[in-house]
Image (cartoon, coloured by chain):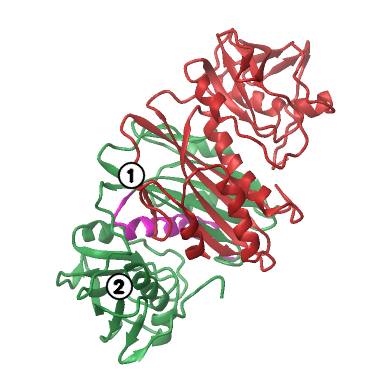
Chain colours: A green, B red
């Protein structure tokens, strides 16, 4: 399986000293850049179902990690995938999983293969960003405008598109940024906690066609960016950027939604 | 859980720009160093049992990744842990898991938390090594002596010790190196395949007290290093280094053990 995979992976020998096949991958980071690292699970019956196509599962596995890189404004450089497989996942399933993953065009440099009784994928993405330029979630300031990209409350996606171009463009424009992976209410709450601020949401949300306001507020898996800025923005490359409110002084993490307190109710694995 | 964890982690602000709590960890690699990256699963009922102490499971989770860094001759710098937890694993279990993991002294900079019906841990370790100095498994040459560290065939360890100091010392001394994670016969086979060479094993193996020769040849989890060298070595800091044979020209991957062909029979998840 690993041999077949190695044949399919083409890597740039300048930045990848040694890819798949050794105890570690060896890569060469660029001078003057900070390294971004993220790791995310994709678990059968938690994040996807056996009936989903393996290509979509592969796409989504890497999309989750890329969305984290986008949220920091970074460039994805390399990825690794740990995969644990049950007996039903034959080599054809695995091959199609990697087909979907490779569509993102990020070099795969390593991973791990193991047995389990359901499919478990853990994605590791390494990205780069010029030193000190990463967009963080702990730096929203009072008076900043709160924005979201795209539309909220979208149904389960087969091929969510990580907002990498937008993230890069927001470098130097956003004061804080994170991706909407668990729902606006909980993710805005988290950003406010980390930044030690409160938020007022007092403008219409960009609710996805067919979705309810509840889904837009508390739905997960939007793969959009939530950011704060001092700039007046409205679009980026055709993608709407919608101002939904303002960062204010107050109890860290508290959100006022059209005059009412908003409880964080997005997806939390431990609720 | 994440807040409690953040309070327990102390990180060096020069190399860790941002640790736990954002979409990605932000770290600052050193100029002149290659980056080593490894990821390994530790799965309940595959790699450990629920009856094992959470401290030992935490220790082992990171030990697996550190053994890979040791095999490349690198210095571990940062780690991330993705953890999926069943309902029985309460906050006390998780806290003790991290107690064991922290004993290695490697800064934890991020991870992921998720639900599953058994404990799944995926460890990511980032290490550094001066550019071009990594020990690889694809560079064993004809005529090199084949060595192993320590003893082989040891029973399941609660606290295996990754051979980090030995790995660093082997920089410039070993021609190829890997860790013995699945058993000598399969790991030596893999090294020979990658290096395009064959091996003769014609000297007594350092069999652990109470273990059989079969266990020394095919047992997994030894956490020792297998390496090739042109140097005459016998010990490193009290640890025996035992020459067991010689790299020769031949069918890549084939091993002759005291005149007989040796089949690779170590632990393979997919057999």
**Magenta-highlighted stretch: main secondary structure?**
helix
Hey, which quadrant is residue A157 in on the image? bottom left
Residue B159: x and y, percent?
68, 40
Using the image, determine if residue A73 lies above or below residue A47. Answer: above
Q: Which mark is residue A150?
A: 2
**What crowding class fits label 2: few (fewer than 14 Cα within 10 Å), some (14-19), or many (20 or more)?**
many
Q: Is residue A22 magenta?
A: no
**What crowding class fits label 1: few (fewer than 14 Cα within 10 Å), some (14-19), or many (20 or more)?**
few
The residue drawn where x is 58% and y is 10% is: B144
Q: On the picture, is B259 further left or further right than B32?
A: right
Span highlighted in magenta in the image: A50-75
Q: Is residue A71 magenta?
A: yes
Give the mark toward the camera: 2 or 1.
Answer: 1
Would you name the residue on which mark 1 appears? B14
Residues B66 and B219: in front is B66
Query: Is there any visible trace of residue A93 in the rendered image?
Result: no
The residue drawn where x is 31% and y is 78% is: A198
Hey, which quadrant is residue B90 in on the image? bottom right
Residues B8 and B98: in front is B8
Residue B229: x and y, percent?
56, 13
Using the image, determine if residue B132 lies above or below residue B256. Answer: below
Hey, which quadrant is residue A183 in on the image? bottom left
How far is the residue under mark 2 from the one under mark 1? 36 Å
Using the image, determine if residue B31 lies above or below residue B122. Answer: above
* Chain label for disc 1: B
The residue drawn where x is 55% and y is 9% is: B230
Query: Is there any visible trace of residue A8 in the rendered image?
Result: yes
* Chain label for disc 2: A
- What secondary structure is found at the residue carrying circle 1? loop
The residue drawn where x is 55% and y is 37% is: B66
């Amino acid at each position: 399986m690993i041999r077949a995979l190695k044949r399919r992976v083409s890597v740039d020998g300048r930045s990848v000293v040694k890819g798949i096949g050794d105890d570690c991958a060896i890569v060469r980071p660029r001078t003057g850049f900070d390294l971004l690292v993220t790791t995310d699970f994709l678990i059968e019956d938690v994040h996807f179902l056996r009936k989903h196509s393996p290509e979509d599962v592969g796409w989504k596995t890497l999309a989750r990690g890329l969305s984290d890189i986008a949220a920091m404004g970074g460039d994805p450089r390399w990825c690794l995938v740990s995969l644990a497989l049950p007996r039903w996942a034959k080599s054809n399933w695995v091959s199609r999983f990697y087909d979907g993953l490779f569509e993102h065009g990020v070099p795969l440099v390593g991973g791990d293969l193991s047995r389990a009784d359901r499919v478990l994928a853990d994605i590791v993405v390494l990205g780069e960003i010029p030193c000190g330029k990463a967009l963080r979630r702990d730096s929203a300031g009072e008076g900043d405008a709160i924005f979201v990209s795209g539309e909220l409350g979208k149904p389960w996606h087969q091929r969510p598109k990580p907002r990498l171009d937008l993230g890069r463009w927001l470098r130097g424009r956003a004061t804080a940024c994170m991706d909407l992976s668990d729902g606006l209410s909980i993710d805005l709450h988290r950003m406010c906690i980390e930044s030690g601020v409160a938020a007022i949401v007092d403008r219409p949300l960009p609710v996805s066609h067919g979705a309810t306001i509840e889904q837009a507020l508390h739905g997960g898996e939007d793969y959009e960016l939530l950011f704060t800025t001092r700039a007046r923005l409205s679009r980026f490359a055709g993608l709407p950027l919608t101002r939904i409110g303002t960062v204010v002084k107050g109890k860290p993490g508290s959100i006022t939604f059209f005059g009412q307190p908003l409880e964080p109710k997005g997806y939390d694995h431990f609720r």
